[in-house]
Image (spheres, rainbow, N blue to C red):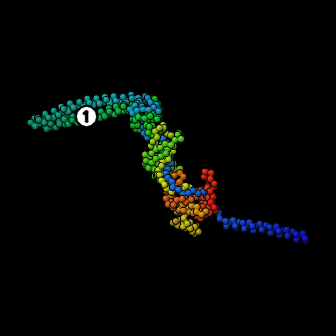
């Protein structure tokens, strides 16, 4: 019996200890739940800055002026006196095409013209005789020496001779036009440079047959370009092209010159879009923008890859905050309205298809005031890579939350307690606000 009593007391002590531990844990959990969460953030003072809005696009270097050299007549290349990279002047011979066929056509047209001229002379003589006969017959008929039937027959012969003469005149004109065309085709067998420049591309070789542009696209034998005037052709997204204007300055980085930034000016913006991947999820709509490169001291080559930063607008002495400091929050009224909608039973209505992303949201920044985050509604202006202009909402010299990304975009709400942990500058002590 004594052993049973000792065992009962031992069990009582064990269960009492376990209960005490559980009670302590519950108290700690309750007290911990009542303790307010402190969010660690980084801050930056609102200052006045100069902000330049930039649109970035990529593209290629191309000459402002280049000409595709294609023959207007078909045939075999018998002379190709230029090579890639050669400089040419306006009027220099670039290509000669075998002219034999066109010489024969010219000679045939010339013979046809001579034959037509001879026929014209014959019909002209016949017409002159018919005129003389008709005048004499008219006089005889007036004196009663010639009958009406005889006069009518002579008049008919006169009209036929006149018609034959006029027909021969038109035939001479037609054959002369054919001769002019044949001579023009013969002249086109020799192609001259239409401009001063450099042969940047040569597609054809000596002895190769080429197709003229008379009935189809024709063969591009070579390209002549003016390399002294180069431009950057970039594709700008449809959402950004509305920001770009003629005369905007551009800073151009060419991959071949990594240590050099070229200066350019926008001089042409396409009116028609270039669309890729139509009907797919990867559909892209761009507009080509041409930028005249002002630097002339470096030899840029056609086809070089580049990235251009187009400075679309600059504003001086404006209030600015780090671009990551501006986020969005739903207004309190919208939050309450959405909460009520969630509580109500779902049923079909004309508003049932309304999407949540159509709900109005405010752009805000968080200002640190007395160790707490204060939500301030703002209106943005232009922005650059690091800072955004604040048009409304801030007066200047406020301390806005600039990090972390998670705190700004997800965790923080109006009135939350914060602890500022900014990185030291120039070896200074860590700045920490009292919590």
From the viewer's side, name the closer residue of 317 and 226. Answer: 317
For this view, does 122 lie left or right of residue 367? left
Q: Is residue 324 visible?
A: yes
For this view, does 185 lie left or right of residue 206? left
Q: Residue furthest left?
A: 143
The residue depicted at 39 percent of the width and 29 percent of the height is 99
From the viewer's side, name the closer residue of 251 and 331. Answer: 251
Number of residues whose C-alpha sits closer than 10 Å to that of mark 1, classed few (under 14), some (14–19) or many (20 or more): some
Can you give x and y, in whole percent of width and height, for residue 286 in the image? Answer: 48, 49
From the viewer's side, name the closer residue of 363 and 233. Answer: 363
The residue depicted at 46 percent of the width and 40 percent of the height is 295
Would you identify the image quadrant in which residue 372 lies?
bottom right
The residue depicted at 52 percent of the width and 41 percent of the height is 260
The residue depicted at 44 percent of the width and 39 percent of the height is 229
Q: Is residue 285 visible?
A: no
From the viewer's side, name the closer residue of 153 and 408. Answer: 408
Seen in the picture, residue 294 relative to 132 is either above or below; the reply is: below
For this view, does 32 lie left or right of residue 126? right
Can you give x and y, in whole percent of width and height, for residue 16 in the image? Answer: 80, 69
Can you give x and y, in whole percent of width and height, for residue 230 in the image? Answer: 45, 40
Total labels drawn: 1
Circle 1 SS class: helix
Seen in the picture, residue 40 relative to 94 is either above or below; the reply is: below
Q: On the rendered image, what quadrant is the C terminus found in?
A: bottom right
Would you identify the image quadrant in which residue 406 lies?
bottom right
Can you give x and y, in whole percent of width and height, for residue 140 in the image? Answer: 11, 35
Q: On the rendered image, what quadrant is the N terminus found in?
A: bottom right
Where does label 1 land, which residue? 169
């Amino acid at each position: 019996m004594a052993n049973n009593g000792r065992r009962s007391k031992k069990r009582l002590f064990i269960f009492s200890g376990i209960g005490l531990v559980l009670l302590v844990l519950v108290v700690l959990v309750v007290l911990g739940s009542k303790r307010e969460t402190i969010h660690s953030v980084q801050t930056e003072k609102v200052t006045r800055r100069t902000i330049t809005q930039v649109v970035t696009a990529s593209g290629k270097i191309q000459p402002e002026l280049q000409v595709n050299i294609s023959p207007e007549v078909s045939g075999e290349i018998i002379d190709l006196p230029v090579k890639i990279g050669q400089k040419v002047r306006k009027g220099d011979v670039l290509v000669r095409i075998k002219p034999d066929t066109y010489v024969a056509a010219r000679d045939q047209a010339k013979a046809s013209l001579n034959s037509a001229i001879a026929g014209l002379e014959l019909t002209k003589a016949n017409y002159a005789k018919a005129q003389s006969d008709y005048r004499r017959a008219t006089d005889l008929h007036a004196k009663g020496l010639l009958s009406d039937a005889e006069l009518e027959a002579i008049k008919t012969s006169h009209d036929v001779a006149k018609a034959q003469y006029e027909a021969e005149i038109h035939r001479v004109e037609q054959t002369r036009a054919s001769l002019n065309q044949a001579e023009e085709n013969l002249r086109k067998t020799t192609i001259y440079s239409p401009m001063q420049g450099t042969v940047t591309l040569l597609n054809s070789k000596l002895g190769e047959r080429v197709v003229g542009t008379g009935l189809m696209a024709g063969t591009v034998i070579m390209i002549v370009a003016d390399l002294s005037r180069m431009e950057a052709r970039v594709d700008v997204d449809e959402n950004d092209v509305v920001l770009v204007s003629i005369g905007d300055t551009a800073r151009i980085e060419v991959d071949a010159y990594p240590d050099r930034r070229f200066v350019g000016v926008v001089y042409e913006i396409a009116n028609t879009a270039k669309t890729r991947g139509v009907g797919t999820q990867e559909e892209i709509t761009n507009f080509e923008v041409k930028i005249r490169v002002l630097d002339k001291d470096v030899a840029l080559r056609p086809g070089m890859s580049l990235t251009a930063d187009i400075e679309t607008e600059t504003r001086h002495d404006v209030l600015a905050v780090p671009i990551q400091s501006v986020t969005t929050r739903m207004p309190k009224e919208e939050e309450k309205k959405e909460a009520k909608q969630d509580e109500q039973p779902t049923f079909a209505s004309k508003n049932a298809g309304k999407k949540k992303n159509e709900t109005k949201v405010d752009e805000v920044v968080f200002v640190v005031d007395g160790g707490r985050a204060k939500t301030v509604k703002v209106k943005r202006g232009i922005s650059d890579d690091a800072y955004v202009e604040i048009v409304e909402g801030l007066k200047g010299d406020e301390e806005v939350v600039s990090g972390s990304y998670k705190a700004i975009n997800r965790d923080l709400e109006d009135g939350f307690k914060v602890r500022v942990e900014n990185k030291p500058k120039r070896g200074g002590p860590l700045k920490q606000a009292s919590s």
